[in-house]
Amino acid sequence: MAMSSTHGEHRRVRITAAPNDGAVIEIDGHDVASSVEAYRITQTVDEGPEVTLYVQQGWRGLEFDGLAEVVVEPSDVRQVVIGFLDAVDWRRLDEAVLDRDDLDGQPGELTRGMLAQLREWAASA
């Protein structure tokens, strides 16, 4: 079974969501909401919409056919990282890094400090 569109192929996608309500996620009229943990809709000026579905581990997929390119990926990696980074307040990160006591004056110290701070925040999230 195909899990994503091939280049140039499009699927009919319907997504409705509201806070505190369950989302409706349909691909070609097939309800896939119970398998989807997150989704992302992107569109550039030069390209049509792309819907990325982040699915639960072990999802077997569906055969799709429709009007939007669909990308299906595991939800446990990229979406979590993207969500974490989107939630980082750069001012708070800047302050936390500058307050670290492990900065050593060597080249790349701020980058190493940022990565260490983000790692610590991720571990406590």
Image (cartoon, rainbow, N blue to C red):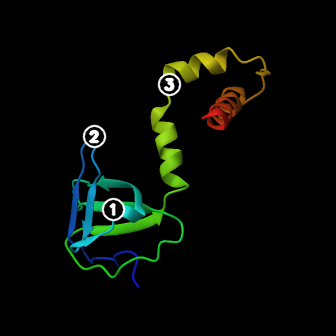
Apparent side of residue 53 relative to residue 118 in the rendered image (left or right): left
* Foreground tag (2 vs 3): 2
Q: Position of residue 84 (x, y in %)?
A: 51, 39
Q: Position of residue 56 (x, y in %)?
A: 49, 63
Report the amino acid beneath label 2.
Answer: Pro
Instruction: Give the residue pinned by disc 3.
Output: 90
At 50% from the left and 30% from the top, the residue drawn is 88
Q: Is residue 88 above or below residue 43?
A: above
Report the amino acid beneath label 3.
Answer: Trp
Decide which of 82, 58 is in the foreground and name it.
58
Label 3, residues with CA under 10 Å away: few <14, some 14-19, many ≥20: few
Instruction: Give the residue pinned by disc 2.
Output: 19
Report the amino acid beneath label 1.
Answer: Ala
Q: SS of the residue at dot 1?
A: helix
Q: SS of the residue at dot 2?
A: loop
Q: Which of pointers 2 and 1 lies earlier in the amino acid sequence?
A: 2
